Image: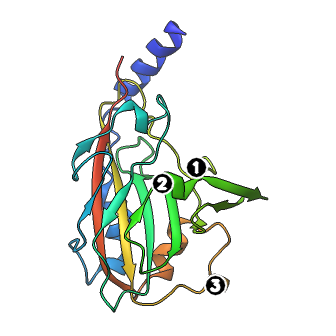
Amino acid sequence: MFLLKVLEYCIGRLLYRLRGYDELCFFRSRAFAQHAKPNITITSPDCGNSGAKLSNDFSKFGIGRFPSLQWERAGPDVKQYLILTEDPDAPLRKPNVHGIYLFIPPTVTSITNDDLKLVDDVDGVKTVQAGYRVGKNRRNAVYVLPRPPLGHGPHRYFFEVVALSECLDPGMISKVPTKDELEEAIVGKVVGWGLWEATYEQKW
């Protein structure tokens, strides 16, 4: 086990410069061209304001919780939300998607760990307690917990709440939609968005 950690640390240091793929994040796609800056304030009852440091409880090395998020009530122009979380510092030459949740009603002003509890999984199509559709990530999980490589330094995790002026058509969206698919599906529908950022580092 010790030798594996040494190996991981060495690889992490070698890959250290592979990070900072902010330009490839969801909120930098063409759907956000008219809304370059966030206009929704997001806080976390669990962790605090944007810029918080995640404890092990919110990582692969702890009990593994999704940090609860809250935002203000939507205006009448908001018909639906979607939430996407990604790590722009993953050494993959693009952000690593950790979770996608869509078809969130405009009356919702928070998302919690309990909302994302898995209720059913049929052929990869997941049902969570809150009823949201779950999108694709590399682990085919509801939510991929932070686990940056040892030696790669702190990673930032972006939790993005996107307000839409039109409801997405369930029949036009894949059962397990990808980030790329949603970037196209929401073009012309974005009326606002917010970003809650947190950092986590795997330490020796």
Q: Return the residue at label 3.
A: 172
Circles 1 and 2 in contact, beta carbons < 8 Å = yes
Residue type at numbered disc 3:
Met
Colour mode of the rendering = rainbow
Q: Residue at x 29, y 45 (%)?
A: 47
State the CA–CA distance, disc 2 to disc 3: 21 Å
Q: Return the residue at label 2.
A: 97
Q: Earlier in the sequence, mark 1 or mark 2?
A: 2
Query: Seen in the image, is 118 located left or right of residue 185?
Result: right
Residue 123 position in % (x across, y down): 79, 59
Q: Nearer the viewer, residue 73 or 183?
A: 73
Residue 4 position in % (x across, y down): 53, 14
Question: Which label is found at residue 54?
Answer: none
For label 1, the crowd category at 10 Å Cα-Cα, with few meaning under 14, some 14 to 19 and many 20 or more, is: few
Q: Quadrant of residue 178?
A: bottom right
- Indicate the quadrant containing the C terminus: top left, top right, bottom left or bottom right: top left
State the CA–CA distance, disc 3 to disc 1: 22 Å
Q: Circle 1 sits in a helix, a strand or a loop, which is it?
A: loop
